[in-house]
Image: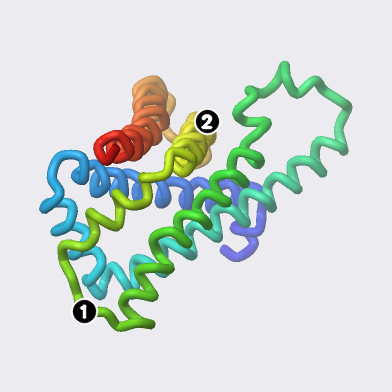
């Protein structure tokens, strides 16, 4: 089993599984954030539950962080191995054998990783400081105002949307690639491809809409 996961196929399978895990989290994250557009109280209620539930805080959150780190580290490892393998064969025009998205996954991934670091600085670190450093009293209605405050600056909104455009590009290739690595049945390939396009464009677009909505709603 250990040898399998060290093999090229095993690494690609691990990469695919971590990608599916992160896409499930991204969907869940979006479903929570989109409630802020429709209901301040509902957003506060859900966020307070997520922010105080021990299962989420002490089990799911560390697993998520580990999943993010694993996915990006494995991405770099596979990129290095692919480059080494390419140099061992005859030179082939990459543009004729791969899409622009697949050739630039490593770069879009690096930008997304930088965005995630900023996202943790913006939201996760203040949350840790609030709960475990300053030990401030619990306020179940603080989450909406904290979210909206992040979108007061148009430069931040622009950077936020740019990162999600790159995420869409990353997902357009990564989603279908992950399903192929998991051995998806060809019979369902077309319908899955359609769902992958809807997800890959719809979720990042939804996050952009949330940011733009709160910016203009607070002018």
Residue furthest to the front: 219
Question: Would you name the residue on which mark 2 appears?
Answer: 169
Which residue is at a point 20% across and 40% down the rendered structure image? 37
For the image, the number of numbered tags is: 2
The C terminus - image quarter = top left
Q: Is residue 72 above or below residue 89?
A: below
Residue 20, position in %: x, y? 42, 46
* Mark 1 secondary-structure assignment: loop
Mark 2–mark 1 contact, CB under 8 Å? no
Let me know if residue 196 appears in the view.
yes
Which residue is at a point 25% across and 67% down the rendered structure image? 51
Question: Would you name the residue on which mark 1 appears?
Answer: 137
Residue 125, position in %: x, y? 43, 68
Q: Nearer the viewer, residue 203 or 149?
A: 149
Q: Nearer the viewer, residue 182 or 18?
A: 18
* Mark 2 secondary-structure assignment: helix
Which residue is at a point 27% across and 79% down the rendered structure image? 136
Residue 177, position in %: x, y? 52, 35
Q: Earlier in the sequence, mark 2 or mark 1?
A: 1
Let me know if residue 178 appears in the view.
no
Q: Nearer the viewer, residue 122 or 174?
A: 122
2 vs 1, front mark:
1
User: According to the image, what is the colour scheme of the structure?
Assistant: rainbow
The N terminus - image quarter = bottom right
> Is the residue marked by circle 1 packed among few (<14), some (14-19), or many (20+) residues within 10 Å?
few
Which residue is at a point 39% across and 60% down the rendered structure image? 123
Seen in the image, is 102 located left or right of residue 212? right
Seen in the image, is 138 located left or right of residue 168? left
Quadrant position of residue 202: top left
């Amino acid at each position: 089993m250990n040898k399998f996961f060290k093999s090229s196929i095993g690494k690609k399978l691990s990469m695919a599984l971590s990608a599916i895990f992160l896409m499930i989290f991204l969907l869940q994250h979006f479903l929570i954030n989109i409630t802020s557009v429709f209901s301040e109280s509902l957003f506060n209620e859900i966020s307070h539950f997520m922010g105080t539930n021990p299962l989420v805080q002490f089990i799911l959150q560390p697993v998520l962080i580990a999943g993010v780190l694993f996915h990006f580290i494995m991405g770099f490892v596979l990129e290095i191995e692919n480059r080494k393998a390419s140099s061992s064969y005859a030179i082939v025009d990459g543009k004729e054998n791969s899409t622009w998205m697949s050739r630039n996954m490593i770069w879009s991934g690096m930008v997304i990783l930088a965005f995630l670091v900023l996202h943790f600085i913006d939201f996760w670190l203040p949350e840790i400081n609030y709960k475990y450093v300053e030990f401030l009293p619990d306020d179940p209605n603080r989450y909406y105002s904290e979210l909206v405050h992040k979108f007061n600056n148009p430069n931040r909104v622009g950077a936020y949307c740019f990162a999600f455009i790159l995420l869409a590009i990353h997902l357009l290739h990564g989603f279908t690639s992950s399903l192929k690595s998991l051995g998806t049945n060809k019979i369902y390939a077309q319908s899955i491809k359609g769902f992958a396009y809807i997800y890959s464009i719809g979720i990042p677009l939804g996050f952009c809409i949330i940011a733009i909505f709160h910016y203009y709603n607070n002018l």
